[in-house]
Structures are given as C-alpha cells and as structure tokens.
Amino acid sequence: MHSSPTCLIVALAVAVGGCALFVPGLPPPHGLTGGEHLHVVDDSLLLDIIGPGLHPEDFHRRGFRFDRVLPAGAEVRVADDYVAQREALAPDAWLIGRNPWIYVEVVTSPIPAQRGWKGWIYLGTTGAATAPVAPLADATVTRESRLCPGADSIVPACVVLLRAVTPVRVLGCGGRRVHVELWNVDGLYIHGFVNATQLDRTPCVATKE
C-alpha cells in the first residue's frame, strides 16, 4: 500500500492535519534557510522531488538507470528559494524544518557537467570540506564494452555501451563480470556489470549491495 503525499511528508518528520504521527529519532532542527554552502562527503543522490524518508536513498538499489548522483568532493549551496520550496510541499507542516532533505544548487563538482544542477540532497551526506574523498575511478575499460544490468544478464539486455578508456569505479568482483559504477559526459551516474576481461585491472572491494 502506498502512502498519500500528505502522510508521506509526515513520515519525513512532519505532522500534517489529521496525519500527526510520532516519529522516533526525529532529526534536530538544522536552521538552514538559503545561501549556506555544504560540502558533499558521501556520494549523494540529487532528487527532483523531496526525498521519501528520514534516511538517504541507496542509489545502488535503484536499478539499471542513469541517475543524478553527486560525487564526494562536490560543493552545493542551499537554494535561495529552499524555504519556499519546502513550504509549498507541506504548507501546514510544523516540523518541516527538521526534514533532512535540503533543496540545493551545485556550485562545483568533480564532474563539471553537474554545475548548476538543482535538487534535493540528503543533509547527512554533507560535512566538512576537509573530509577524505574517494577517487572517481580505480579502473579503466580498455575497449568498447557493454554494461549489463546484472552479473548474469543476457547480452541483449546489456544496452549501454562504454567507450574505450572509460574510467570506472569497481564495487565488487566475482565471476566473469565485475560490478562497476561511473559517470557519463552529461554528469549522470549509472552502475552495472562489465566483463572482467574488459578492464585494465579489477581491484576487488566489498560490494555495496
């Protein structure tokens, strides 16, 4: 069963009309109103609409799709119309100032195409600018390759083509295909599986799945 939009906002740490609920672990007021600069310290999904819960969205579980994901190292600015945006979503929500999803504009990013993007980011993925930042890639596709939605996908399902010398970050190894993630020239993120023989190296790490 899907919650109504009003009651969904309640689940985001607000109380609206007759849907007042007690939400354990309610985030404290963050005090952001617009103009503040935040630094992304964990790769973070940038949503077109306010997030659906009190926790960050796991973009590794969103399926085989291109997404707007800001890499660690990006800097964002809380949008001037942030307060107006959140109040338009829930005009009677008296706890909306505790909602951990913040409307921002990208100021700088390791992925240049992302500059100027606007959307909702999870506040908990931001922090001090001095936090260590993971590299965007630790392997390279040596020749044109197909990116597959699953480790055991049939070839016709592998519809995304990767050019030679495409940088990727390895998420997990096992079998003949390696789980990788990458950003394209438009700044969009995707993850999938590529034949291990197509990479220059396969540094194995614990999968995020």
Image (cartoon, rainbow, N blue to C red):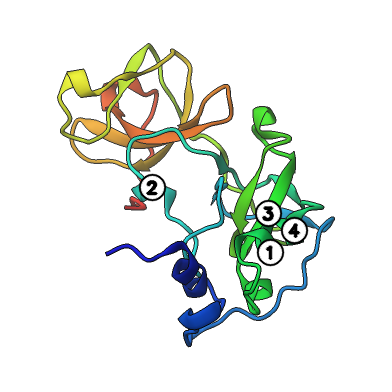
Nearer-N-terminus badge (2/3): 2
- Amino acid type shown at disc 3: Tyr
Q: Would you identify the image quadrant in which residue 86 lies?
A: bottom right
**6 relative position to 82: left or right:** left
At 65% from the left and 81% from the top, the residue drawn is 28
Q: Position of residue 17 (x, y in %)?
A: 54, 79
Query: Circle 1 sits on which residue?
Result: 87
What kind of element bears circle 3? strand
3D distance between C-alphas at marks 3 and 4 = 10 Å
At 57% from the left and 54% from the top, the residue drawn is 42
Query: Circle 4 sits on which residue?
Result: 84
Q: Position of residue 8 (x, y in %)?
A: 45, 67
**66 relative position to 63: left or right:** right
Nearer-N-terminus badge (2/4): 2
At 22% from the left and 24% from the top, the residue drawn is 157
Decide: marks 2, 4 in contact (CB < 8 A)?
no
Query: Circle 2 sits on which residue?
Result: 60
Q: Is residue 1 above or below residue 190?
A: below
Decide: marks 2, 1 in contact (CB < 8 A)?
no
Q: Nearer the viewer, residue 79 or 9?
A: 9
Query: Circle 3 sits on which residue?
Result: 103
Q: Position of residue 77 (x, y in %)?
A: 78, 50
Nearer-N-terminus badge (1/3): 1
At 77% from the left and 66% from the top, the residue drawn is 32
